[in-house]
Image (cartoon, rainbow, N blue to C red):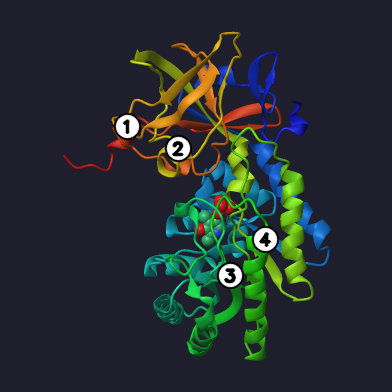
Amino acid sequence: MSPSSSPRPFVYVQDRLVCSGVDVTALAEQYGTPLYVYSADAIRERATMLQQAFAAAAPRLNTTLCYAVKANSSLAILKMLGEAGCGFDIVSGGELERVKRAAPQSVGKVVFSGVGKQAWEMDAALQAGILLFNVESEAELELLSERAVALNKTARIALRVNPDVFAETHPYISTGLSAHKFGIAIARARAVYQRAASLPGLKPEGVSVHIGSQIRAVEPFGQALARVRSLVEELRSDGIAIHYVDAGGGFGIEYGEGAFDPAASVASYAKELAAVMQGLDAQLLLEPGRFLVAQAGALVTRVLYTKQNGDKHFVITDAAMNDLIRPALYQAHHEIWPVVKSDRAPQKADIVGPVCESGDFFARDRLLPELEAGDLAALLDAGAYGMTLASHYNTRVHPAEVLVEGGAARLVRRRETLDELMAAEIL
Ligand SMILES: *Cc1c(COP(=O)(O)O)cnc(C)c1O
């Protein structure tokens, strides 16, 4: 496959895996493994793809991408997306601090989501002058009003409504049903907006929704947004001037071997949303995370050992569930590619890490060309919810990260040291 027809920046050139023109073996040798490798070019391409899809589907609709920082919060990636014109969707004061450091010019395009915002986080966001607070409960509304008054600021708010729409995805990443902890039931929203409008320091200006993650069908997004649109119309008739509609994130990718044309699928997503927004006269905010970064990244690991237990063959890698937890947490599938293609025969194997948990696996009974100790392998589509979910379990340091841009790679996070890992501890 040529780079342009692949949804991933990782391709083979003469049997060697290359990321946007840079040899992956050379990166592993220079920076060690486990190593996260991201293509800045691929991330930028996805952002442009999304922007262009909306420009084509709805030329007059004002659309802003607010990248969901929790998908991959690398400062270098935030900086790059800020320069590409993106705003940010944050879920903590820590993520706000990242945006302030990496993309200070974009703080005015930050939306703040999350069910458990604390007073200090509200204060920091009010001081920074973010665009919008996505408020998820009435109690949060009261606290935000108090903090805004105390700081003599006005908080622009949206209520995150729960549209009670079912979207087919893993139960841990589905959020749009009333059984979930997120948002305010849409049926109660009108009354809560009245309450918000009556509180000092708050200015209700938006409605937001987010139905879950890794959703491949476009219809649930349209259904949820249609319910939001009806609410916007009701609120306007109640005298509340709504300027922003935040449609959330959640647009999925193909993790398997199946064909995936990101441009075509995002075009149908844009069409679906644009049809609902038609004539509403509001700015559309989108909070894409995974779609922008997942396929731009891989986790590169080296095989430590192989062994046979009964009829099971195991390949033990130097990366583990603490570096990439998606297979253990969501039974997620990641393609695993040898970094150098061999002509060895395919073999069924469990690809596992060294962590002391049976859940520490990347793949089970996967048919791959035989991997031997010392070989490098790449876990694909690891750019989202990879490094951000990494832990120190088993006292393992965080991997290093490199960013490939314009045919060159640079280290954007060096490998942690054990001293750093233990720095906050008191003996
Ligand atoms: C996680 C999250 C997103 C991003 O979801 P993706 O599936 O990565 O696009 C967007 N908005 C909110 C509120 C989220 O919690």
Would you name the residue on which mark 4 appears?
A: 219
Confirm if mark 1 falls within 8 A of ligand 1.
no
Cα distance, mark 1 to mark 3?
40 Å
Task: Point out the quarter of the image occupied by ligand 1.
Answer: bottom right
- Label 3: few (<14), some (14–19) or many (≥20) C-alpha neighbours in 10 Å: many
Q: Position of residue 350 (x, y in %)?
A: 43, 24
Foreground mark, 2 or 4? 4
Task: Give whichever of discs 1 and 2 has the lower sequence position.
Answer: 2
Q: Secondary structure at mark 4?
A: helix
Labels 1 and 4: the sequence-earlier one: 4
The type of residue carrying mark 3 is: Ser
Instruction: Answer with left or right where residue 207 lies relative to residue 399.
Output: right
Q: Which residue is nearer to you in this view: 29 or 380?
A: 380
- Rate crowding at label 1 as few (under 14), some (14 to 19) or many (20 or more) other CA atoms within 10 Å: few
Q: Is residue 139 left or right of residue 295?
A: left
Q: Which residue in the structure is indicated by mark 1? A: 358
Amino acid of disc 4: Glu
Q: Residue furthest left?
A: 427
Callout 1: helix, strand or loop?
Answer: loop
Question: Could you tell me residue 421's position as x and y percent?
Answer: 32, 36
CA gap between label 2 and label 3 equals 30 Å
User: What is the count of numbered marks?
Assistant: 4
- Mark 3: is the Cβ under 8 angstroms from ligand 1? yes
Circle on res. 208: 3
Occupied quadrant, residue 54 = bottom right
Q: Using the image as rendered, state which of residue 312 and residue 199 is in the foreground.
A: 312
State if disc 3 and disc 2 touch (CB < 8 Å): no
- The residue drawn where x is 65% and y is 37% is 40
